[in-house]
Amino acid sequence: MTHITLHKRSIARIAAVQSLYQMALIQSSDVQTVEDFQKHFEKDLLKEVASKKYDREFFAKLLQGTARSLKDIDPIIEKALPDNWAFKRIDHVILAILRAATFELWQFAETDSPVIINEYVNVTHAFFDDKEPGFVNGILHNIAGHLRG
């Protein structure tokens, strides 16, 4: 088995995607979701990486910022989709990935676009084995071009 080193922000990104997915399913608030996740992370979730530190501040900013900006983020994602894809057709996990990545591309200018895109393609690989990582990669390249020129 190949050992993958996850950095503090990589773990925070995975946590944010899982939390955004959870929020969509149970309609919880972003503040409550941050508290719940941080309370239970070390005990229950992501047991393979739970012993590692993650960037709690980055996680909270990413999750809360994304959740509070969906009215701005979703149209950006929709515009970046291929012509034959309807927004409502996007898998909920993929949508959580695209939302977090879009927010990060939009609001974290200090991080280079290729780094953000690569991170979220890796997050996608954590959930999917088929064509989804390529789909996410293509959409995020379109979004990065739109947001960052």
Image (tube, helix red, strand yellow):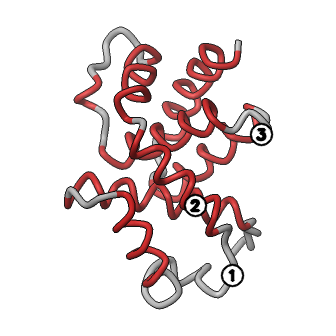
Residue at the bottom extreme, as displayed: 43
User: Which of the image's four quarters has the C terminus?
Assistant: top right
Please tell me which residue is depicted at 62% across the width and 19% down the height of the picture.
147
Please tell me which residue is depicted at 43% across the width and 84% down the height of the picture.
40
Mark 2 Cα within 10 Å, few/some/many (few <14, many 20+)? Answer: many
Please tell me which residue is depicted at 56% across the width and 21% down the height of the picture.
143
Q: How far apart are marks 2 and 3 (CA)?
A: 15 Å
Residue 45: x and y in percent read: 45, 79
Please tell me which residue is depicted at 45% across the width and 39% down the height of the picture.
99
Residue 62: x and y in percent read: 55, 51
Task: Assess whether mark 3 and mark 1 are in contact (beta carbons under 8 angstroms).
Answer: no
Q: Mark 2 points at which residue?
A: 59
Label whose residue precedes the other's in the sequence (1 or 2)? 1
Residue 28: x and y in percent read: 25, 61
Picture quarter containing residue 7?
Answer: bottom right
Question: In the shown orientation, is residue 100 left or right of residue 5?
Answer: left
Label whose residue precedes the other's in the sequence (2 or 3)? 2
